[in-house]
Image (tube, rainbow, N blue to C red):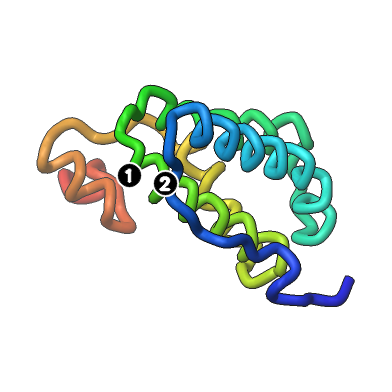
Amino acid sequence: MTITPARLATVTATSGTYQNARQKVLALYRDWQRAAPTIITEYHLDIPTSAVRAKIREEFEKHRYVNDLRLIDILLFKGRTEYQETLNLWKFSTHLLNYFEKEEAGPKPAGFLEKFYGNANFKIEKIIR
């Protein structure tokens, strides 16, 4: 696939009404969902399509209740930019895998010493002995 930077470029415009902004958000969401199989193929990811689509939905759900039109326009711009960078292969697969890494991480340490010893290459038992 040849990479044409302007292929996915869109004009950034402000949304005049909430209905107009909603249409733009839905169009971006559909574009991301349609691109999920292409992303998996192009980046050689070992993740099922359903997991990628679920992650896309989760990222959109984070901002579901945003009511400020200016903020919606900024989020649309960032979403389109991410979409263009992803499909033009301007990212490494590690950038995409960072989205999925957060789920696999275990429980976070609660106290200071647990955090400190968790970052070290040895365990607490070695220090005590």
Along the line of sight, the residue nearer the viewer: 41 or 28: 28
**Circle 1: element type:** helix
Q: Residues within 10 Å of mark 2 (few under 14, many from 20)?
A: some
Residue 73: mark in rendering:
2
Q: Position of residue 92 (x, y in %)?
A: 63, 68
Q: How many marks?
A: 2
**For the residue carrying disc 1, how many other residues have a C-alpha within 10 Å: few (<14), some (14-19), or many (20+)?**
some
Compared to 90, does 124 lie above or below?
Answer: above
Residue 108, image quadrant: top left
Q: Amino acid at mark 1?
A: Arg
Q: Kindly identify which numbered label has been placed on residue 70.
A: 1
Q: Pointer 2 and pointer 1: residues touching (CB < 8 Å)?
A: yes
Q: Position of residue 37 (x, y in %)?
A: 82, 45
Q: Amino acid at mark 2?
A: Asp
In terms of depth relative to the viewer, which is nearer, 93 or 58? 58
Whether 64 is drawn above or below 71: the answer is above
Q: Residue at position x 62%, y 61% from top?
A: 10
Left or right of residue 125: residue 45: right
Assign a secondary structure to mark 2.
helix
Between 56 and 106, the one lying in front of the other is 56
Cα–Cα span, label 2 and label 1: 5 Å
Q: Relative to 114, is 28 on the left or the right?
A: right
